[in-house]
Image (cartoon, grey):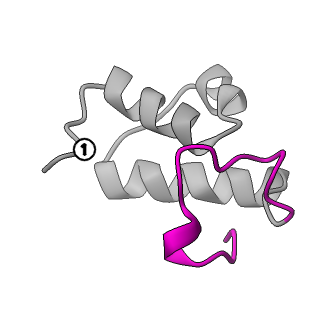
């Protein structure tokens, strides 16, 4: 998907600082998050995700406890 090492996944990871993060890989990332957490995001929510922090905020807005 993003073809980066696990240790490089930090809150500031974004489409601006990760060359492999294009529109397709961003969509695949969101798709995998939806599958993993059994969620479905709205199109406008998906379009707003531009960073790992955005993805975390979207998950927490759906009342997902990321500490489990």
For the point 17% across and 47% down, which residue is it? 67
* Quadrant of the rendered image containing residue 24: bottom right
Q: Is residue 42 left or right of residue 2?
A: left
**What residue is pinned by disc 1?**
66
Please say whether residue 2 is one of the residues in the magenta stretch.
Answer: yes
Quadrant containing the N terminus in the rendered view: bottom right
Q: x%, y% of residue 61?
A: 36, 21
For the point 69% across and 77% down, which residue is it? 3
Please say whether residue 4 is one of the residues in the magenta stretch.
Answer: yes
* Quadrant of the rendered image containing residue 8: bottom right
Q: Secondary structure at mark 1?
A: loop
For the point 66% across and 21% down, which residue is it? 44
Identify which residue, 18 or 49, lies in the foreground: 18
Identify which residue, 53 or 1, lies in the foreground: 53
Q: x%, y% of residue 16?
A: 84, 45
Q: x%, y% of residue 28?
A: 64, 59
Q: Is residue 67 left or right of residue 30?
A: left
Determine the main secondary structure of the stretch shown in magenta: loop
Mark 1 surroundings: few (<14), some (14-19) or many (≥20) residues within 10 A? few
Task: Farthest residue to the left: give it.
Answer: 68
State how many labels appear.
Answer: 1
Q: x%, y% of residue 17?
A: 81, 52
Identify which residue, 67 or 31, lies in the foreground: 67
Question: What's the magenta region?
Answer: 1-19
* Quadrant of the rendered image containing residue 19: bottom right
For the point 54% across and 61% down, which residue is it? 9
């Amino acid at each position: 998907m993003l073809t980066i090492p696990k240790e490089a996944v930090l809150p500031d990871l974004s489409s601006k600082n990760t060359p492999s993060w294009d529109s397709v890989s961003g969509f695949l990332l969101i798709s995998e998050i939806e599958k993993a957490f059994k969620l479905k995001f709205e199109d406008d929510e998906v379009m707003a995700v531009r960073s790992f922090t955005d993805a975390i905020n979207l998950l927490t807005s759906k009342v997902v406890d990321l500490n489990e």
